[in-house]
Image (tube, rainbow, N blue to C red):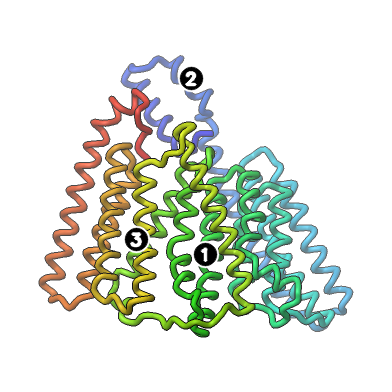
Amino acid sequence: MVSEKFRHQLRQEAANWRDEALISPEVFSQLSDRYQFDQLDRSARNRFVMILLGLGAILLGLAAITFVAANWQAWSRLARVVLMMSLFIGVNSGGFFLWRNTQRGWSRLGQALLLLGGLLIGANLALFSQMFHQTGSIHELYLIWGLAVLAMAYSLRLTSLGVLSMLLTMQGDFVVLPSDPQSLWTLFLQYFPLVSILLFLPLAYWCKSRWLAGLTLVFVSIILQLHLVRALEAASWDEMWIAPYLMVAATCLIPLLLWAYRDRHWPHLAPNLAVFYVSLWSTIFAFHYWWQDSPTIGTAGLSRELIPPLINFGCFSLLTVVLWWRLGFIQGSIWRLELISTTFALLLLSLGGLVLWHSWSGPLIVFGPLWCNVVLILLAIACIREALGKGQRLGFWWGILLLVEQILSRMLEYDTGLLAKALVLFLCGIGVIVAGLWFERYVRRLEPTAIASGQIKPAA
């Protein structure tokens, strides 16, 4: 399905071609019928009407909320329950029937109402628990709310509801764990990195949504990193021998897992996230502040609270090994990794070795930030090289951004004068402009030959 912006541009260009006699009126009529030029103005009017309807609905909703708040205490419990349930059923029913409408404007309004219905689930849960004096933890509210919205997302195959469910369950994991170690929700949260894959990744395939798949990978990475950091804090506080290895896991496990995950629907999504993760990690730890003190390593054994994080770590490590083994067979029946995959793995292993060295031998005030800067330079060069080979703008500009960010961060980290900062900013600006103009000219020369022959993909 072509975008409306493309149809507007095509109508304008086709009209110019017709006026210049480059195409006949019959060809213009065929283009008009195929791309429905006559409906573009109608779509604009419908969009304006939908904006007015949406604004009016928001005002009506605010009026209803204000009215309910003014009379909430005066109403009986039965009246409150009937009101909340009627609102919930009415919004979701109206959203469902509008969502099934063939017109895009009404369908979007239906999706908005269904999203509002998902939000009303939390309001109903909170108000009903308050009315019937049911006490519970805030994380339980978020988790039940998120799982209910997730059920709606699976039944309707809506990406927006999946994103809302992801945010709600993440909020439930961010709060403090419940005090009862035997509760079901405690067990759910302890193994939430594993559970989140089973909950959200099939939904991304079900919805065939690249955005939802990317957000799922980011969501799982954040949750896994959060659990590893919590385990690392507990191990470092009690001076356990496993603390350095948890530091290595927090550094290397997630990018190794993302790089090896390749799917035929979105093959470059996870590797791009892996590059972003390593770039962000190297940028943060390129500052010498993080390398001034080394953690205290003891000989204490494992505590009971570390068992769930270690199980998560073991399962994800096994999954990483399986994915890397599968990655080696992409090129053929003989196991062999590409040069870029081998280089990326060696870079990550070097960062893991750097973390172990820092933990065992003491602060690496000089070599630690130095090697992180080297990794950033190598990543930038690799991104630019791959972009030049494939004619893709994303990798090129990401490499340029890494180089510029590294120069600016080192300038801000160390004491430099204003004239030096002005000179660096001026040179960076000139360099970015020159590099961008050269790359655009290079891509235009590359497209008619290599892209037409199918050797590379068009520039993104």
Q: Which residue is mark 3?
A: 350
Q: Nearer the viewer, residue 79 or 443?
A: 443
What kind of residue is marked 2? Ser
Residue in the image at 56% along x and 64% along y: 313
User: Which circle, 3 or 2, is nearer the viewer?
Assistant: 3
| Figure check: 126 above or below 149 | below
Residue 9 placement, left or right of 417: right
Which class describes the residues within 10 Å of circle 3: few (<14), some (14-19), or many (20+)? some
Provide residue 264's location: percent of width, then percent of height.
53, 38
Which of disc 2 and disc 3 is earlier in sequence?
A: 2
What kind of residue is marked 1? Ile
| Figure check: 60 above or below 6 | below
Report if the CB atoms under discs 2 and 1 are less than 8 Å apart.
no
Q: Compute the Cα span from label 3 to label 2.
A: 62 Å
Residue 259 placement, left or right of 413: right
Label 3 secondary element: helix
